[in-house]
Image (cartoon, rainbow, N blue to C red):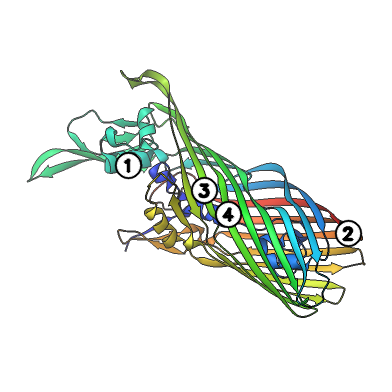
Amino acid sequence: MKRYIITVIIALVAVTGYSQDFFDAVKFAQTGYGGTARSIAMGSAFGSLGADFSSASINPAGMGLYRSGEFTLSPTLNINSVNASYLDKNRMDDKFNFNFNNLSYVTTANTGVESGIVSVTIGLGYNRLKNFHSRIMVYGEDAQTSLLAEYSDNANFDAGHPDYFDAFNEGLAWNTFLINEDPDLSVIEGIYYDDLSEYAKYEIYEDNNLIGYGYERTAVSPHKQKSSIERSGRIDEYLISLGMNVNHKVFFGASLGLVDIEYRENTAFTEEDNYNVSEYLQEYTQTSDIYHSGMGINLKTGIIFRPFKSLRIGAAVHTPTFYSLDYGYEKSIDAYFDQEVGDDELGYSTSHSDEISDYYDYNFETPMRAIFSASYQLGQIAIISADYELINYAASKFRHAPGDNYDYSSQNGDIQNLLKATGNLHLGGEFRLTQNFSLRAGFEMFGNPWNKTHTFEDGTTGDILNFNDIYRTYSAGFGYRQQHFFIDFAYRLSQITEQYQVHHMYYSNGENIAGLTEFNNQATLTLGYRF
């Protein structure tokens, strides 16, 4: 059986021109936990520790461990750098971003009894769950794959006539004269071609009679490619959380979360005929601008059991987050030629441009989550904590918005076939040097959501390169506490390695794949006041 290599970064948006895909499903469902500096420094392993507003996003039963009211504010600086390796060339780019990772207010009411419900805590605030800010530069020389080759194939085999060209893909290339039509009427196959490809002519017979000729691509001429990708946005969770302390043994909690999401990605992809293999083409740049924005709602419930003073065991369940989102997609091509090209309708020039856009609404449903946690306190000296989170990415679903009956069954089928259930591990520790000063450290390992292989409708199979993607974080910090005031600091290094498809190819041998190594340096300072 013939084997192909695919990569999930293809994003079906590159095939259909627009609409959601499995890449978006992972992007919006795969979140961490920000919150306070103490939680970040300890690897967000706060599912059983509590008494920290990060608990509202992880296990709201932790709200029941508060003994007093609290106000916190957590300014954060992110420095994101990405190294892209492509065709034996490396490029590094970075981006700075300042935000507030947490803002919260907590009040606790004691019932005055020592059995039953001892206290009730209510918390209001928000935690940042994800930061999208990054800048990527991909550069390669002697590329022997081309986006134009994909577009000319689409023109020949999928569309067959300009009236049926995809307006977001080969239609743009056609309108900017990057795809051309052979004027020879005896050519009946491979009519559409591009100037970066090399072709071989063949004869076509019917009943032993020559009826015409065809062209097939034999190679893509070496040329220069570069791609600049800039991403921005965030996922913030606004919470109202309730926690209860029962007999100082069992703690219950629930959080209602309103999730604010914004994501924007601007990509400029350029192919340059730097060896002058084409008589006409000089270079072209395809620019795309995609954004998603909207709100979602979820509910979290949890329990913490303290069988004895030093040990805490916790469990929490998160419902799906139900998003209502706006989507916008703008795409353009600017093409430049060594001599004038065109037609009587669009005119003749050494440069041609075209653009198209689309906007609509849709709904998205993230998977449920289950979190199991445990922590142990070593006297008054140290704490160790661990959380394990289960999430089935294959359960993500796109839904049509009210008034729009678009069928997302194909996208949801891809999600089920390409994604899987996995787990995220959070580990943390705290060591108290003095009564007021503590040192902290943490580690997080996020499970890979991609299946290893995929079977296409025609029976061929493909290796999903992103099966080897890695996402880990390392954190450390300190805290200083007085009776009413505290200050915490956390530094977290996130390391992500992933495969990125520089330009779309439906079937790829991996030559158009760049390796990305991303480092996000995050510094968070939490200022807190207890009352």
Q: Which residue is mark 4?
A: 297
Q: Are circles 3 and 4 on residues that touch, CB within 8 Å?
A: no
Query: Under tag 4, what secondary structure?
Result: strand
Amino acid type, residue under disc 2 in the picture: Tyr
Pick the quarter of the image with the N terminus: bottom left
Disc 4 residue crowd, few under 14, some 14–19, many 20+, Cα 10 Å: some
Tell which residue pokes out farthest to the front in this image. Answer: 112
Residue 88: x %, y % from top left: 55, 47
Q: Earlier in the sequence, mark 1 or mark 4?
A: 1
Q: Which residue is mark 1?
A: 154
The residue located at (58%, 54%) in the rendering is 297
Q: Earlier in the sequence, mark 4 or mark 2?
A: 4
Q: Earlier in the sequence, mark 3 or mark 1?
A: 1
Query: Under tag 1, what secondary structure?
Result: helix
Q: Which residue is mark 3?
A: 324
Q: Which residue is mark 2?
A: 480
Amino acid type, residue under disc 3 in the picture: Ser
- In the displayed structure, would residue 228 be above or below residue 400? above
- Give the CA separation, mark 3 to mark 1: 33 Å
- Give the CA separation, mark 4 to mark 2: 35 Å
- In the displayed structure, would residue 13 be above or below residue 382? above
